[in-house]
Image (spheres, rainbow, N blue to C red):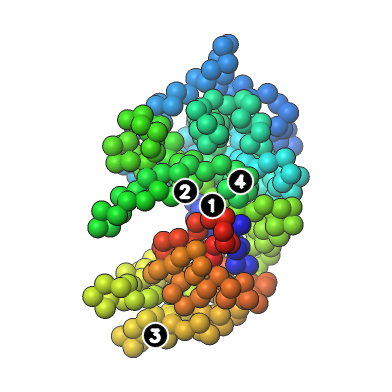
Amino acid sequence: MPTILKVLLTFILFWTITGCDGASSNGQPDSASEPTQSDEFDASSTDDGSSEVDAGTEIDAGPADAMADLDSNCNSGQEPSSNILDQVEMLIVTDLLLQPSFEVLAEWKREKGVPTEVVTVQFIEDHATGEDSPAKVRDYIRTLFTEKGLRYILLGGDADVVPYREVHSNSLFSNEDDFASDFYYSDLDGSWDENQNGIYGEVADQLEMHPDVAVGRAPVETTAEAEAFISRVLAYEQSDPGCAEKALFISEDTGYFELDSAMQLDPLAENVFPGNFLKQKLYWKYANYDDAQDNTLAAQENAINEGRCFVTHYGHSTEWDLNSVMSADDAGSLNNAPYFPIYVSCGCWAGNFPNYSYDTAG
């Protein structure tokens, strides 16, 4: 299981910046909206048991607006697609062992007015269609998206708990690689294997690369790990330790032509993040920026321990290194409670959750 780093996972970022209140018409959660796994999954089934949502069905008209689908349920004046009592706005997919733990999180979401369903992979495999387990999970998600107003998905488990789709990539300088991608559960258009060669995510598969739903994964394997993760989510949502508007920006040597990744990161810090944020910058070539400091391990540790609750890293990472300065072991030694930051990295492999030989840094 990847080290949780004592921080919240990136999926909370989606909920924080894209969410709209899921309260019912009277502003209060309605217990009748609580779905149960015991209910037979028949939202998209035909008489012969097949799914009405074909694997190649187009879900939307195109990426005219990268957030169009994600925000469609929030548009004022839009007629609801179904009775609010039938809606499932958030889906948590886990297994039988971890289901009771994630029900605690689901109950909190329902109290907030977000209709939430917890379902096991075992249930999905018995009731959805597809060529393998990832395809069946995606089929279940697609059906709830088209018929129940699904917007948010939490995959509650590591790679051996909730399946992932391995996809193919042609990267910089024509390097080719295969890697795990949960975006397969977010972009719901097409099959991701248009040429039907068994290799998912190729250029020839004509991916739209447009998120239809927000997806995140809690890479936990045991009840203790799940409860630790959920306790951090609840702490983030239910209390304010005073760090929500304190941001940390980390840049590095790109490895190309002595360029500092701050060339891209600093405009983000200055032009995207609100002006009321307290912004701390740890840059490789810090002398080129009036308000930046040297990017050292001690500086990163102090910043996170002192409560920088939104961390953005542009640079390199591996399964063993969160960035070029902080290793997975360093991350595990942080003493940052009760400050549990959102850590967003564009590094390569820190979030490689299917890595079984070592708990990855992210």
Q: Nearer the viewer, residue 178 or 308?
A: 178
> Helix, strand or loop at disc 4?
loop
- Compared with 355, 273 (above or below) is below
> Cα distance, mark 4 to mark 3?
44 Å
Instruction: From the image, tell me which residue sits under label 3.
Output: 291
Q: Which residue is mark 2?
A: 180
Distance between mark 1 and mark 3 Cα atoms: 39 Å
User: Of the numbered discs in the image, which one, if any, rests on residue 160?
Assistant: 4
**Rendered position, 47 above or below 268:** above
Q: Specify which label sits upstream in the sequence, 4 or 1.
A: 4
Dot 3: what SS? Answer: loop
Is residue 252 visible in the rendered image? The answer is yes
Residue located farthest toward the top when viewing the structure as drawn: 47
Mark 2: few/some/many CA within 10 Å (<14, 14-19, 20+): some
Badge 3 amino acid: Asp
Quadrant showing the N terminus: bottom right
Mark 2 or mark 1, earlier in chain:
2
